[in-house]
Image: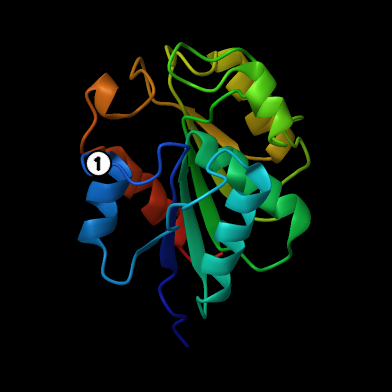
């Protein structure tokens, strides 16, 4: 008996929906894909973002593969500490190291701490996951991402010197994401 193909649920980072971001481009290509909606208030609140992910998940029947980017990865790992729901797999792309100072234009350490993001959870994730790391991400040193992937029980793939895998780094479409998600969609 064939099981249903997983629903792809995209978990954006702090900048939410960005029209020319690889997540948005990819989501448009996949019938039935869902993007966690942006927050109207409390945009930096970790708790509000985790609840938005939970609301999106509660509206989906059947298997789910999460496709998270940047702080969306942190939303996902915080969600996994609080909630229990079967997840078929997760692509965790370019996790932002919120325990280290971020570049100008991003929230400062005091704001990150005040909004509940710290510490980064390091418990093993209860679902298969792939962490896609950049060797030159300005939001996380590859050594830090490697340690997080190990703690989460994730398969780590260093995808090269691709910055933060966002439009500022030259990514619109990122077709490697589709290949990695397909691996996660295979029967367990």
Residue 33 rendering spot, x and y as whole percentages: 34, 65
Residue 99 vs 86, above or below: the answer is above
Residue at x 30%, y 39% (from the top left corner): 176
The answer to which of 150 and 136 lies nearer the viewer is 136
Neighbour class for label 1 at 10 Å: few (<14), some, many (≥20)? few
Q: Position of residue 45 (x, y in %)?
A: 62, 42
Quarter of the picture holding the C terminus = bottom right
Residue 99 visible, this orientation: no
Left or right for 133, reference 161 = right
Residue at 28% x, 49% y: name it.
24
Position of residue 118 in the picture relative to residue 177 (left or right): right
Nearest the camera: 84 or 180?
Answer: 84
Question: Is residue 179 shown to the viewer in this render?
Answer: yes
Q: Is residue 70 above or below residue 34?
A: above
**Residue 117 in picture, x, y percent from top left:** 69, 34
Residue that sits furthest to the front in the current view: 41
| Count of numbered labels shown in the rendering | 1
Q: Which residue is mark 1?
A: 175
What secondary structure is found at the residue carrying circle 1? Answer: helix
Image point 77% across, 30% down: which residue? 119
Q: How is the image coloured?
A: rainbow
Q: Check the image and report above or below for 22 versus 113.
A: below
- Determine the image quadrant of residue 135: top left
Q: Does residue 134 appear to the left or right of 87 in the view shown?
A: left
Question: In percent of the image, x 64 and y 14: which residue is there?
Answer: 100
Residue 43 locus on image (x, y percent): 52, 43
Q: Residue at the far bottom: name it.
A: 1
Q: Nearer the viewer, residue 63 or 165?
A: 165
Q: Relative to 48, is 140 on the left or the right? A: left
């Amino acid at each position: 008996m064939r099981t249903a193909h997983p629903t792809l649920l995209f978990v954006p980072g702090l900048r939410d929906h960005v029209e020319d971001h690889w997540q948005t481009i990819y989501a448009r290509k996949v019938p039935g894909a869902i993007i966690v909606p942006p927050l109207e208030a409390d945009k930096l609140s970790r708790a509000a973002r985790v609840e938005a992910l939970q609301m999106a998940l509660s509206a989906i029947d059947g298997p789910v593969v999460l496709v998270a980017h940047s702080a969306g990865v942190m939303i996902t790992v915080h969600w996994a500490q609080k909630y229990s729901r079967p997840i078929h797999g997760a692509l965790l792309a370019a996790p932002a190291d919120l325990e280290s100072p971020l570049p100008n234009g991003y929230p400062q350490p005091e704001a990150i701490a005040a909004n509940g993001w710290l510490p980064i959870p390091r418990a093993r994730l209860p679902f298969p996951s792939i962490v896609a790391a950049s060797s030159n991400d300005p939001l996380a040193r590859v050594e830090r991402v490697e340690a997080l992937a190990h703690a989460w029980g994730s398969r780590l793939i260093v995808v090269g010197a691709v910055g933060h895998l966002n439009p500022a780094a030259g990514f619109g479409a990122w077709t490697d994401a589709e290949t990695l998600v397909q691996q996660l969609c295979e029967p367990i």
